[in-house]
Amino acid sequence: MGDENSPELSRGRLGLALHKATDYHAALGLGTQMDNDKANVLAQEWAVLQRQWLESWRLGTASASATAAAGGGADAWSKMATDPSQASALFAKMFGSAQSAFEVIKGMAAPSSPGASAAPSPFSIEALSEFFGAGQGANNPLFAALTPGAGGFAGAPTQWSQTLEQMAKGWLAGAAPSNLMPSFGANREAQERRQKLTQHLAELTRQQSAYGALMLKATREGLVLFGNRLAERDVPGQQMRTPREVYDRFIDDLEEAYATVAMSAEFQDSYAALVNAQMRLRAAIATELELSAKELGLPTRSELDASHRRMAELTRRLARLEAGEGAAAAPPLPAGDKPAVKKAASAKPATPVKSRAAGRSAKPVAKRATNPRGNPRAKPAAKLAAQPAGKVKGKRAPSFASSLAAARSGRTQSARKSK
Amino acid sequence: MSPNNGIHLDPSAVMQELTRMGQKLAQGAQVLRDIDAAKVEVGVTPREEIWREGKVVLYRFVGERKPALKTPLLIVYAMVNRPYMVDLQADRSIVRSLLASGQDVYLIDWGYPDGSDRYTTLDDLLNGTLRRAVEVLAQRSGEPAINLLGICQGGAFSLCFAAMHPERVRNLVTMVTPVDFHTDDNMLSHWTRKLDIDLFVDTMGNVPGDLMNWCYLSLKPWRLHQQKYVGLLDILDNPTEVENFLRMEKWIFDSPDQIGEVFRQFIKDFYQANKLIEGGLKIGQREVALKNVKAPILNIFAAQDHLVPPSASRALKGRTGTEDYTEVVFPGGHIGIYVSGRSQREVPPAIHQWLAARSV
């Protein structure tokens, strides 16, 4: 630990309060360690720097919000960082992370009590846990993704989710026993579905809670690990001297602890239970939505699935029928090099062809293609499948194949075009 | 709780860091403003479409010199990301290096599946589409068998293909390919082991690419969700580096949805049951036995790979039917093996030299 009069800053005396440039002096906790003149100079430099940054950013974004930010310091920057409309997403992401990083360091280094001296104060796991919202697993992206209303439930209407949440709350509190009573009458089926749906939501809530507890555990253990590592480095020459060094160490330790928890059997069980619970609820919601869609005469996911399934089966069947043509143009296999597995009726492997086909390899595929009877005008199956239906006269199957191919190639334009 | 004595911040160092951060932020705002995101291109090497089936396209890359080798090299990439990672930019392109060394390079692009592809199976892809693409290449080259370069999940696909159609594979290169899915250090596999995949696929249909991305990010949430963007500060004043960063970001988050039925079998048979090495894997009506892979194998993997741990790739050794097996361990991660400066210097030449000695 540094000497009381040393220019070094002890852990308990650093506070990188970016949002108050004029408080730089106090923010860095320099008061008792540096002479006032030097501190004042640094404070002025800091203030100038911040104005320069903000002005640069204002010019860079040329937005009204950035102008406002110039007067608001890091808080305003932070606002920009969380509002995609006010700054580029990349910058927002970066700055949000950078600010978090410095907040972390600030949290680690803040005095434990007003007027704390150079003597180190206890490392506060609780304070850092609070900062990270560890109880909710706030910094674990998958937790957010699997939370209803977030990414994992992107398709669920918010209002519907809220309704479900209310139902689940009642169920969890034991306040709605009628919701679980046997149902009867004309509305029996609907009531039973809703009951199951409510149970699924309650189960998901339970699993989220369990998962969140593991996130909390991972974060807490990461903080303990970090504290231990700091203690290990309390040797002259091994202390961390820059905020970035501290931050990187901090992340490494959190990551290490997270990996340990994430590889545990408990996590495996919890993860599976959470995902499975979400899927059950999602399926139940989809059922309700389908029923509503049917009432309105709208096509449903099940109907589309049935069509897609049938299309896949027909495409498969057609490919099998045409397999001989597709394979006919390929060069022969080397003597004695036979397929290692038996041919299956449903997936016939390539048929060896006459050797003359091999000698004409430099030409485009379509020009070299032959059918099993050696007709050089015939086109390979794949080529047929890719052609517009109208180009193949008098051949019903290829026309159908091309229809299927066209129907299933909706996003082929997204593939990069040839240069 | 522990005493926190390891931090001795030096005021001058703090000031320097803050100053540097401020300068980077200020310059970065201008850099970001000047970058035309639409011009930050990926997939830089010219290529021509030579075959198409549905959304799947077979491309041939066009190099500045004619191929010196007659045997085509087909790159089979994973379905979980876009394949332009092998051709990200001019100075980070495995494809370009392979072309320059004389390879005739092709790539099968799986495209962006949508709902109409939900019932396409692994059998359809490997014994159907991929087999037909390989036959097209065999036909073009006049060679009965071609060289395959399978990457990540595409490497597992290539192994399966080589086992089911050994007559069509002359040489097999696998890069960062999982073979043993049950090694102790495979976090992704650990998480999937008890998932109800039937429920999952029946409910989701195709699996959204964004959900897959969230899953990958959560493997290292602190680094990938936060520290990476703090690190961006270091390069924020360098337009070239920022453009490189943007390309990587694009690639990472440009994730196709996963075909439901393919996902179902891949997770159940590969991740959960580990059938690729345990046995019992069937794709369609065909059994997949690694012992049926007779082609020479070059197995390249990354020492610090957190998605496909080295142990998962090393498991290939001794499990195939070939006596010509070579391993190359690259010091880097799952992505660095494609794009780092060192990988550009080492990986493509290693692939070319190995193939050239075994091809016509």
Image: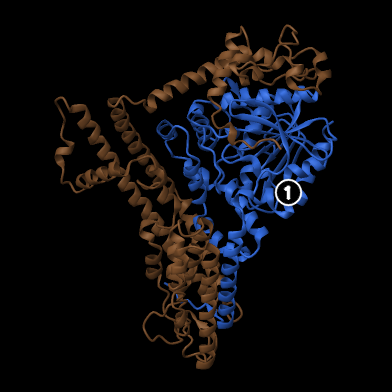
Chain colours: A brown, B blue
Side of B306 where A86 appears, left or right = left
The amino acid beneath tag 1 is Ala
Q: Secondary structure at mark 1?
A: loop
Mark 1 packing: few (<14 Cα in 10 Å), some, or many (20+)? some
Depicted A291 relative to depicted B310: above or below: above
Image quadrant assignment for residue A133: bottom left
Nearest the viewer among A305 and B173 is A305
- Point out residue A155 in the picture as x, y percentages from the top left corner: 38, 39
The C terminus of chain A - image quarter: top right
Q: Chain of mark 1?
A: B
Nearest the viewer among A397 and B252 is A397
Side of B46 where A360 appears, left or right = right
Q: Is residue B172 visible?
A: yes
- Point out residue B79 in the picture as x, y percentages from the top left corner: 58, 36
Side of B356 where A213 appears, left or right = left
Nearest the viewer among B359 and A341 is B359
- Point out residue A315 in the picture as x, y percentages from the top left corner: 55, 18
- Point out residue B165 in the picture as x, y percentages from the top left corner: 68, 24
Task: Quickly name the residue at label 1.
Answer: B90
Residue beneath the point at 57% across and 71% down? B21
Depicted A189 relative to depicted A371: above or below: below
Q: Is residue A1 visible?
A: no
Side of A295 where B4 appears, left or right = right
State how many labels appear.
1
Image quadrant assignment for residue A278: top left
